[in-house]
Amino acid sequence: MMKRIGSLSIYIAMAVFGAINTSCYQQVTASTLKTSYENKTNYSLRNNQVSTPLYRIVQNGKYGFIDKNGKVVIRPQYDLAWSFIDGLAQVKVGARYGYIDTLGRRVISPKYRISYAFANGVALVLIDDKYGFINEKGKVVIQPQYDGALAFRNGMAAVQIDDKWGYIDYTGKTVIKPQFEAALHFHEGLAAVQLDNKWGYINVDGQIVIQPQFESTLKFSEGLAAVQVNDKYGYINQSGKYVIKPQFNDAWEFKDGLAAVQVGQKWGFVNVSGEMIIPAQYDKATNFSQGLAAVKVNDKYGFIDKTGQMVIAPQFDLALSFTDELALVYARGGAGYINKQGEYIWNPTN
């Protein structure tokens, strides 16, 4: 259903805020962090005050959280945990999922076989083999009735009824009737949908504004979207016109004015005009975040700046993008966090 992520798939687990897939619930080891989604941050306590971001750790097979200084604020005790979004995080106790707040208090008891992060006060959960939505008190606000669903984005959620996808609003009202073979999140006013095995884009009124014609797509980011035609990727604008013609073996979204693209077997970075700003020379690469991007050189990951200078030497088995000044890295058989100087804030643990 989604665009093939290729070599970037090791960075982001698409199950998070994406299509429902029980395979995202993995064995509890540091390798779960290694292949998990890019660590998100917590911006608000339940009283709506700004809080310090918390970072997920795994220690002796149990999950907990640290602050940006590496201090343990919620001791490792859960069989699995996801990062804080809107002040709440999913945690697994035994075979069920519930939610805790940033103080470690159990807000919703573990009772769901599958659950996903809160966004704008609602979370997607599986109840009796159907998907519905709960509020922050655990009350069902949209009855379980969907065969598949995505989390809410920009006021709408894609839902599946039988074999067709459409969109609902926060009240559960259908705002775009189920009619698509697949549907993704709205971003920058447009959402990718699939018809007759081709991908195009609709607006918030459900009108097709870019005809389905692509083998795969990514969401719009900084006004452009990566699309695949035959076996090459290029970028279109919101009018559906090519800004960068299809020429890459793979491509990723624009962040901070640059996008990671694959030329042959190597990755580099282009600007919005399609100019190769950083030559394709890396075995793998993430997008830029907070001025740095993780790249793989000779089986090890390090970080470059936007000039292409290596600022943190390749030394990690895997590295993810920086979030709030820290990056998740995998080394010495464990998962840890480093700062922008390459110093460990949390030494790798498993």
Image: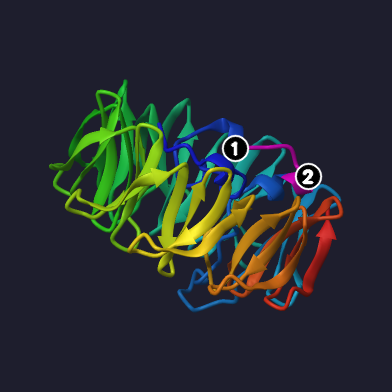
At label 2, counting other C-alpha atoms closer than 10 Å, the crowd grade (few under 14, some 14-19, many 20 or more) is many
Q: In the depicted view, which residue is nearer to us: 95 or 290?
A: 290
Residue 28 shown in magenta: yes
Q: Can residue 319 be seen in this view?
A: no
The answer to whether residue 231 shows anywhere in this view is yes
> Percent from the top left, x then y, of residue 139?
43, 47
Residue 314 colored in magenta in the image: no
Q: Look at mark 2 in the image and give the residue it sits on.
A: 29
List the single residue furthest toward the top.
162
Over which residues does the magenta segment extend?
25-31
Instruction: Report the front residue among 140 and 30.
Output: 30
Locate residue 274 relative to residue 106 in the image: left or right.
left
Residue depicted at x 68% and y 55%:
296
Q: Disc 1 versus disc 2: distance between alpha carbons?
A: 13 Å
Task: Tell me the kind of residue under disc 1.
Answer: Cys
Label tally: 2
